[in-house]
Image (cartoon, rainbow, N blue to C red):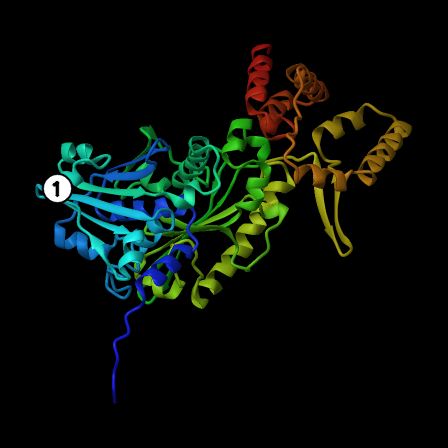
Amino acid sequence: MAELTVAPYAPSLIESMRSVGYSLESAIADLIDNSISASAKKISIRYSPHEAPYVAILDDGFGMKPDELTKAMRHGSRNPWDVRAVNDLGRFGLGLKTASLSQCRKLTVISLKDGELSARCWDLDLIAERENWILYVPEAEEIERYPLVSDLLRQGRGTVILWEQLDRLVAGEPNLHRALAEKMDLVREHLALVFHRYLAGEPGLSKIEIRLNENQVAPFDPFLSWHSAIQPLQEEPIIIENHTVLVKPYILPHISKLSPDELRQAGGEEGLRRNQGFYIYRNHRLIIWGTWFRLTRQAELSKLARVKVDIPNTLDHLWTLDIKKSAAHPPDEVRQNLRRIVDKIVGTSRRVYTFRGRATKSDRLIHSWSRIEGRDGISYVVNREHPVIGAFMEKLDVGGRRMLELLLDTVERTFPSDALYADMASDRPRYFEDENLMEKFRDLALCLLSTAESIDGGRERILSSLASLDPFCQYPDITASIIKELKGAD
């Protein structure tokens, strides 16, 4: 049987690979993966729109010697089936080249290891001219003139990735300076999210620093885990082929508990809805987010649910990870477990919305409204056992109580549910407070106390339970102040 070795036509293949689908932000994130795999702690991204525009990335990783650099510049430099280190963020050995050449026509990598400085360059115009895989080797004098090389020499080790001839970035841009600045703003937001666990220095993870034109990138935590009203649920392990997938759900705070700045950080009302779902991390690096993998649909009442899923790189073959590391699909065994978890957490998210940021399962709270499930659907009724309603009832005669019942029935039957749903789905802020809130709450507390004066110990019971009573429980600071004031008056 005859065999032939058929090498791909270099100019055609390399131009085709430029269209894999990288955005600027995903391309830069792919390069930072390499820096993290090289144990870098500081990563600097620089760009210049002037004269000869460039984008460069400098890291302080362990660097590469000439032979190592040549291997790294080869397309498909690693076998995807090779066993990788637990902190290795690579996969196919294509990211450095495909990510870079998706944005530029000239890629140069300069590396310093053990005092030895070397560089290699892919120039698409040279490849087209020679019709072959020509890897250019710059001379020492040329290397020293490249941007950031002086910084590389000062730090003593590391790597510089240099993009020149930015044809994809400058195409059709009348103002390159403004266009590049706007695109780099998107890069900053993307890196802040994708590498937030590295940037924050999560326990057990080496902290890294990323700077964009000398401005430090701050981590963005999509779970708002720093917020006091966040509801982290039980973490669950899923064992696949003797490897562990960790699943930890979170229920974000209701928007009424978020300040305008916190709501903006969470992506606004639209961002909350759009970004619900699973957040898949491969070796702590976010690769895909804002999807339920068709296990449930995105809905208004589940928008507070987000699920962190940690997968090791040893299960890449099961998650069908793509070249850009921006898409992954869970295997059937994982999907079955995720479906069970989804049903539980989506229900919790809905309960949070039922009573403005509080789970209804808490028996310690006395709500103003009751949610009634019947055969014909769901209805909301005023809680007749609420102490405020009871106090008012006691002051009325039979006719007055009848009129109050008719009034409450009218309020319940005309509850503007459609308008409320539309408002909850909009980005417009909703305000329930007013300037006289303290005074109104004090009057309400005094009204309750007046009904308990004839009951032995009634005043103390009212004051001790006030913080668990709607609407006092929604404003703990105001309630605490009123309780302190009224106790001092005894």
* Residue drawn at (13%, 55%) of the image: 67
For label 1, the residue is: 140
Q: Residue at position x 53%, y 37% from top?
A: 267
Q: Answer with the quarter of the image where residue 334 lies.
A: bottom left
Q: How many marks?
A: 1
Residue 253 at x, y = what percent?
A: 53, 37
In the rendered image, residue 101, in percent from the top left (x then y), is placed at: 34, 51
Q: Where's residue 451, x and y in %?
A: 72, 21
The furthest residue to the front: 129
At mark 1, the secondary structure is: helix
Looking at the image, which is closer to me, 70 or 241?
Answer: 70
User: In this rendering, would 46 be left or right of 331?
Assistant: left
Which of 134/380 is in front?
Answer: 134
Residue 277 visible in this rendered orientation of the protein: yes
Left or right of residue 295: residue 163? left
- Residue 61, relative to residue 404: is it above or below? below
- Find residue 313 and report its horizontal and vertical position in percent: 31, 58
Residue at the far bottom: name it: 1
Residue placed at 28% from the left, 51% from the top?
123
Residue 154 or 34: which is nearer the viewer? 154
